Image: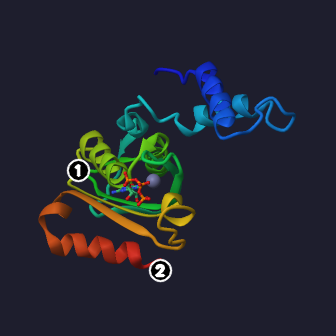
Amino acid sequence: MRAVDTARIEQAVWMMLEAIGEEPDREGLADTPARVARMYQEMFSGLHRDPKEELSARFHVEHEEVVIVRDIPFYSMCEHHLLPFFGVAHVAYLPHHHVVTGLSKLARLVDTVAKKPQVQERMTNEIADALAEALEAEGVLVLVDAEHLCMSMRGIRKPGSRTTTVATRGRYAEDPRERDEVLRLIRLAD
Ligand SMILES: Nc1nc2c(ncn2[C@@H]2O[C@H](COP(=O)(O)OP(=O)(O)OP(=O)(O)O)[C@@H](O)[C@H]2O)c(=O)[nH]1
Ligand SMILES: [Zn+2]
């Protein structure tokens, strides 16, 4: 895994502060470039990682039906403005030959795809692809519901607007009735 170049982030943040007319050396800002570099290290830790590796825990359970983990909170960064978008992901899969993964691994998968410059559609699809490939799941449905700060705090300024994206694979892509049943189960929480 390639590490984030913290020294260059520090330089860049210092220059950005100067460029907006600030005094980067004043007391309150003196540690900001290093702080932002540490923060970016954490926020972009999913870059250059294979999301499928989060699903390494695989085991057999006598279970024939869908597994759904709802309301997995996430924070990501929109790649257009480098502002956060955040919300919840709902992840559903239909195991193949009783092969399941640990429940926490689904949340780890969401975190990994969220922690890099992203757009919501790609994030949704990357979660679905990882499940379809690593578990060879019979069906996958991922629903992501998020607010984008680039739409709330600037530009069009529509706080509270939410974006929903769905990705389906396998049986949930092929059979609308099966897909609707999973969507119904996901919405039980609402
Ligand atoms: N499809 C999609 N668009 C996104 C996402 N995050 C941000 N955007 C949009 O990316 C677009 C970038 O448009 P541009 O016209 O290049 O940028 P801009 O001038 O800052 O646009 P405004 O936000 O409309 O002010 C905007 O419409 C954003 O709302 C995302 O996850 N998915
Ligand atoms: Zn944006």
Label 2 element class: loop
Residue at 47 percent of width and 67 percent of height: 156
Tell me residue 93's x, y (percent): 30, 57
Q: For disc 1, does the CB lie below 8 Å from ligand 1?
A: no
The Cα atoms of the two marked residues, 1 and 2, are separated by 29 Å
Amino acid type for the residue under numbered disc 1 = His
Question: Does 116 appear above or below 150?
Answer: above
- In the rendered image, residue 39, in percent from the top left (x then y), is placed at 65, 36
Circle 1 SS class: loop
Q: Which residue is drawn at 20% across and 63% down?
A: 172
For the question of whether residue 30 can be seen, the reply is yes
Q: In which quarter of the image is residue 47?
A: top left
Left or right: residue 21 compared with residue 106 = right
Residue that numbered label 2 is attached to: 190
- Identity of the residue drawn at 68% across and 33% down: 18
Depicted 41 relative to depicted 137: above or below: above
Image spot of residue 58 (x, y percent): 37, 40
Which one is in front, 142 or 149? 149
Q: Name the residue under label 1.
A: 96
| Nearest the eye: 85 or 51 | 85
Q: Earlier in the sequence, mark 1 or mark 2?
A: 1
